[in-house]
Amino acid sequence: MDIEHQPESSLRRALGLVAAFDRALRENEDRVFAVRRAADLDEVGRDGRIGLILSLEGAEPLGLDPGLADVFFELGVRMVGLTWNRRNAFADGAAERGRGGLSRLGHELVERLARLGVMVDLSHASEQTFADVLAHEARPHVLVSHACCRAVNDTPRNVSDDQLRALAERDGVIGLMALPLAVDPERPTIERLVDHVEHAVSVAGIGHVALGGDFIEQVHAVVGTTNVPDSLLRPGASMGQPLEGLAGPADYPALIDALRARGFEGERLDAILAGNWLRLFHRALST
């Protein structure tokens, strides 16, 4: 394991990022605020301010101690992805070639997260981890914050139709991501992203599909680059390059135009743009 993924180093980095998050809130309180409970969602958009939910992507900072989830909850974390592609002490990620899922510690962590009311993000989970979390008797609130459809672009980083249906049965939501890796390395366009939207809606239903941009070039500018396992990349595929015409949130009007051109209007469009996330967040943060 690389030193940056050792538990001590991961914990130090995660705590540093939490501190940076809090500092950004203080320095930009006229523009952003933290969402930690359902009532905070009522402030989203008021006076133009953006609500931010603090998330942990990969449980490596917890080391071998699920109890540290309580600490991160007190620090404001309300969403946890158990893995970031690689295997850790809690679960297997999407880049692993075996059939591993939740470990014993992973089952303990999921139970603790459910008790705290922390959402479990399955974006980078292996197929078995995905299934294990959905089958867990603690029944945590679940989502896929950023992925696309394997039926449209076959990569382990995307989710299958069976996973889409299982997520919908739990009233979860998938956020469709805007990276060529997931959308289509050969045709990295807004139109191909809308193909994923159409497919996800046809399988999971309009109430379970949203946007999950993952505009990683903008993230890299702040926190540095991230190495993606080769098993998730097609030959010649790029991780960080954005879709054509969709480099970040400022370009969402172009995506909205493309969605409207495919017939998404009114309540159906509102559900994809915000309504489905807000429904999930209200329910989860009321726990």
Image (tube, rainbow, N blue to C red):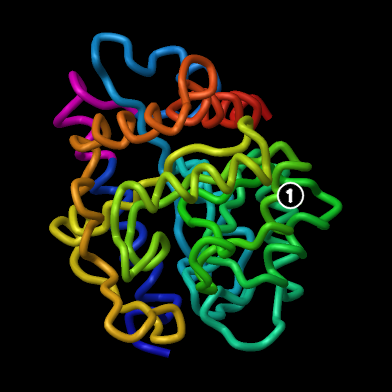
| Amino acid tagged 1 | Arg
Q: 79 above or below 100? A: above
- Farthest residue in the top direction? 47
Q: Is residue 23 inside the magenta stretch?
A: yes
Q: Would residue 189 be found to the left or right of residue 41 on screen? A: left
- Farthest residue in the right direction? 137
Residue beneath disc 1: 165
Instruction: Identify the residue at horizontal 45%, vertical 76% (top origin).
Output: 7
Q: In the rendered view of the protein, which quadrant contains the C terminus?
A: top right
Q: Quadrant of residue 109?
A: bottom right
Q: Which residues are magenta?
A: 22-33
Q: Would residue 114 be found to the left or right of residue 21 on screen? A: right
> Could you say where residue 268 lies in the image, as x and y percent from the top left?
53, 23
Q: In the rendered view of the protein, which quadrant contains the N terminus?
A: bottom left
Choose between 98 and 141: the one closer to the eye.
98
Instruction: Identify the residue at horizontal 40%, vertical 83% (top origin).
Output: 229
Q: Would residue 69 be found to the left or right of residue 274 on screen? A: right
